[in-house]
Image: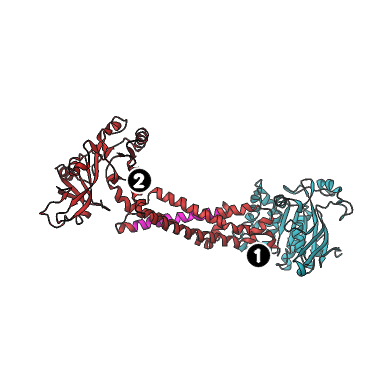
Amino acid sequence: MDHEQGWPKVTATGIKQLSIKTTTLGMVSGMGNGTKTAVLRGVRLVKTYGDGDSRRVVLHECTLELYPGQVVLLMGPSGSGKSTLLAILSGLLEPDEGQVLVDDEGQLRDLWQMAPAERDRYRRRHTGFVFQGYNLLPALTARQQLEIVLHWCGDYRDSRRRVDELLERLGLQQLQGKKPAQLSGGEKQRIAIARALVKNPAFVFADEPTSALDWENGQRVMELLRLAAHERQAAVLVVSHDQRLLPYVDVHYHLEDGYLEERGLPA
Amino acid sequence: MLYALLMLWHERARYAAGVLAVTFSAVLIALQVGLLLGLFKITSIPIDYTSADIWIGSTAVPSVDLGKPIPKNFVSRLAGLPGVSMPEMYIANFANFTKPTGGTELCFVLGSLLDPEAAGALTLLTPEQRDALTMPYAIIVDESDVKRLGLDTDRSQKPKINGKEVTVVGTVRGLKSLAAPWVFCSLYTARQLLGPLLPPDHVTYLLARCESPQRAREVVAYLRERYADDMTAYTAEEFSFGSRWYWLTRTKAGLAIGYAAFLGLIVGMVITAQTLYSATVANAREFAILLALGVPRWRLALLVVTQAFWIGVIGIALAYPVCLGLKYLALQFATDVDLRWQILAGTATLTIGMALLAGLFALRSVQQIEPMSLLR
């Protein structure tokens, strides 16, 4: 999982280390597209809310895989548990049952069996997030929004150059000196995506990234997420209820009444 | 550090309340202490208006007006030390002043050598006054005490000290007294006036000049170590501050300032803590995403504490000019506010400490931030 620096060189057969480790757990053959190795697998995930009569099962033994270089779209009606599934897969919310298997420095581990500090460290190294609200710090310029993530994650190495490269690659250099108040909604979301990518993460989790934007800006955001997946070999999971995103994704899951199924994409 | 300052500056309107609270606390503390120390300068006048660098008195004497007699031959302990002038004798004691108009008043007799080079002579004396004081039983008082001592009306009767007639040969200005008016005279006159109150071959203090303040500190350290059993040595600066501090605490005035300063600190701390808390809560979603991205929570805690530190620093920076302005204003009303560097440094330490404590209180806001809140 070479995503520590620069643009990762990932072979067509996926991430080498993980393929070795995961073979024994059956994560290679017969899972997904068969040409790449899953870098994350949610296995039989169950989540319920409430107690007694008010108990509601949000996720029924959901299983889902994320592959490097793919954009996965998770759709479903409001309240169907899409965000809950994203939170569980990304290490923010503990499932009641099931596993989230990830590669941790060559070892296949259940994210939810890790100690909290280990899980934080894992997230620090491997995950990026984009949310509906851009949540940019109002005092900082676009460039500083990216730098603060690197610096506060303890990664000062070449931070300036890395931020420069990313802003240039995403076509955001002209925004680097602007603060959130000077940016449009679309620009803010693009900066938020750059912030999610600045660590060069293996995973990008995006929760309704386009729902606050008009369609033109929504398309640009999806292009950036596709870029993250196809060029940087990140595994991108997008949660949305917007059907218009389907042409931009590689895999489409549908979640309804707690049940997850993979669906086809439009031709 | 940079991010903390950027956020402070960006939300300066929000943080202004905290900064002003810190400024208020700092001004309150510095002025309270400065005012009282200024007032209690009165207690160290005999030290501050002489040119001695070293004062030697009885064991553990806490204030210049509480010295007990010491043998004159202690002079030998000081004489001959390198960089130290020939020691001088100095007499200081309370006495009973009988007004020419009748009635009595407690006074404090200060007797010293009077030649121009004398370390114990009052620096405000003119050459004429020095000459006049060489007459037996000649005294000088401060003009602010003239009325109190009954010297402003009937000149036909002579005042007396401890039953002995004295002649007032002049007045000085600016040497106000608190409990007992100062009476300045020669060493001879002082000994005569005090009579049996001062045993023969004893004085109250031995004074000396030194070639430098550093040498004075060295000599004092040496004397303290060598003769701790039967005398005390101070530099003039130490003895002056010690005398003020003694009366400040003895009269419970210290308690009053302590209480007022404590109230100021509490007010400052509560407002600063609340300001930081609300500012952090207002940015909770922005901080939550940083946590989601794996930024350790201690980074946010450090940010809040760093902001608290800067609020303290900015508050102090604003407080100093305000204090100096108020000091100047007080001078217009003949009130001295002693804002020596120790007071300003102590105020800064206390106030920044208070701001940091406020930052720690505000940390509960960081504990409440949860990345999951972004998904709800």
Closer to us: mark 1 or mark 2? 2
Label the red chain with its letter: B
Q: Can residue B31 be seen in this snapshot?
A: no
* Residue labelled with disc 1: A184
Residue B249 or B52: which is nearer the viewer?
B249
Residue type marked 1:
Ser
Q: Chain of mark 2?
A: B
In-image side of B298 versus A219 (left or right): left
Distance (Cα) linking label 1 and label 2: 66 Å
| Residue reaching furthest to the right | A30
Q: Looking at this view, is A57 or A259 the one in front?
A: A57
State left or right for residue B350 relative to residue B53: right
**Magenta highlight on residue B37:** no
Place of residue A21 in the rendered image (x, y in percent of width and height, measured from the top left): 83, 46
Can residue B195 be spotted in the picture?
A: yes
Please tell me the colour of chain A.
cyan
Which residue in the structure is indicated by mark 2?
B242
Instruction: Give the residues in magenta.
Output: B306-329
